[in-house]
Image (cartoon, coloured by chain):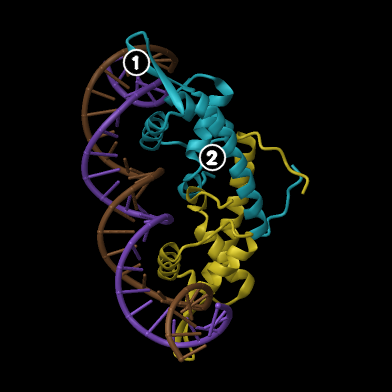
Chain colours: A yellow, B cyan, C purple, D brown
Amino acid sequence: MIYSSELIKGTLKTIVLKQLENNKRMYGYEITQRVKELSLERILITEGALYPTLHSLEAEGLVTTETEYIGKRVRKYYSLSPEGKTKIGEKISELADFMNTMKFLLDINPQTV
Amino acid sequence: MIYSSELIKGTLKTIVLKQLENNKRMYGYEITQRVKELSLERILITEGALYPTLHSLEAEGLVTTETEYIGKRVRKYYSLSPEGKTKIGEKISELADFMNTMKFLLDINPQTV
DNA sequence: TCAGATACATAATATTCTTATGTATATTTG
DNA sequence: CAAATATACATAAGAATATTATGTATCTGA
């Protein structure tokens, strides 16, 4: 089951920044594959969503980039900037808090996983 | 702290439908006030977001409406349709599942609340 | 009386997604 | 070895849905 896209809206930047926090340096395609794998195929980030998001994060100064060539193919690596490192902590706190509020609002009981 | 609007995107219909499940019959303004109260002022639904959403839910057949006059002032009550009752269960399941995936992706530890 | 709350609605604008398209290289498989 | 698939970037048109602003009107409390 793939999550409906509305759900992912609003969390995409957080997901991307978190991957960069975990892995130091990643390129776009790698992020989509990693998230697909970690989410057991349930979060599929399309290219049309990913690249504008990465460009936006760069414009906000939250990530920095380095372009490399692997053979003849270009690859653009992204890393968290110092501001990005601060931001990801804030975003995760806010999301965690929001999820607790949603659980309460929607009567979702904690699961024993 | 008010949640950033991006977070609420994608969950607004679920929040509204859940309130209607809990309270059988509510009008728009009442929903905004109830959600504001239950969320401890952290989820503020604006009118520009609420009314188009309610109209959309009606167009989808998930809610039915009755208009009443309280004195001279009109009030439009919303109730879940049978399809809406089914839908809210599905939406909450999906959201609960999504939140578990997000916790895992973002290394959010369960809180002892 | 008059400010603020109640109660609906819509329009212009912004954001951000989906879907489609474009370009190109690398790898796997029949 | 040819063709399909995967890798890898990017942008544009269109859709969905939010913000912000505006409009109308009634009710209530200080």
Residue A17 image offset from top left, x and y in percent: 55, 66
* Position of residue B54 in the picture relative to residue B85 (left or right): left
* Position of residue B62 in the picture relative to residue A14 (left or right): left
- Residue found 52% across the figure and 68% down from its top: A83
Q: Report if residue A36 is visible in the image.
A: yes
Tell me the tag on residue B42: 2
Q: Which type of secondary structure does the marked residue at label 1 adopt? A: strand
- Residue found 60% across the figure and 56% down from its top: A92
Residue C26 image offset from top left, x and y in percent: 50, 87
- Residue found 48% across the figure and 37% down from its top: B13
Residue A29 image offset from top left, x and y in percent: 51, 73
Disc 2 marks which amino acid? Answer: Arg
User: Residue B75 or A46: which is nearer the viewer?
Assistant: A46
Q: Which residue is mark 1?
A: B74
In the displayed structure, C10 sits above or below C1; it is below
Residue A4 image offset from top left, x and y in percent: 51, 49
- Residue found 50% across the figure and 24% down from its top: B80
In the displayed structure, C30 sits above or below B102; it is below
Disc 1 marks which amino acid? Answer: Val
User: Residue A12 or A44: which is nearer the viewer?
Assistant: A44
Q: Crowding near pointer 2: few (<14 within 10 Å), some, many (20+)?
A: some
Tell me the tag on residue A20: none
State the separation of the CA atoms marked 1 and 2.
28 Å
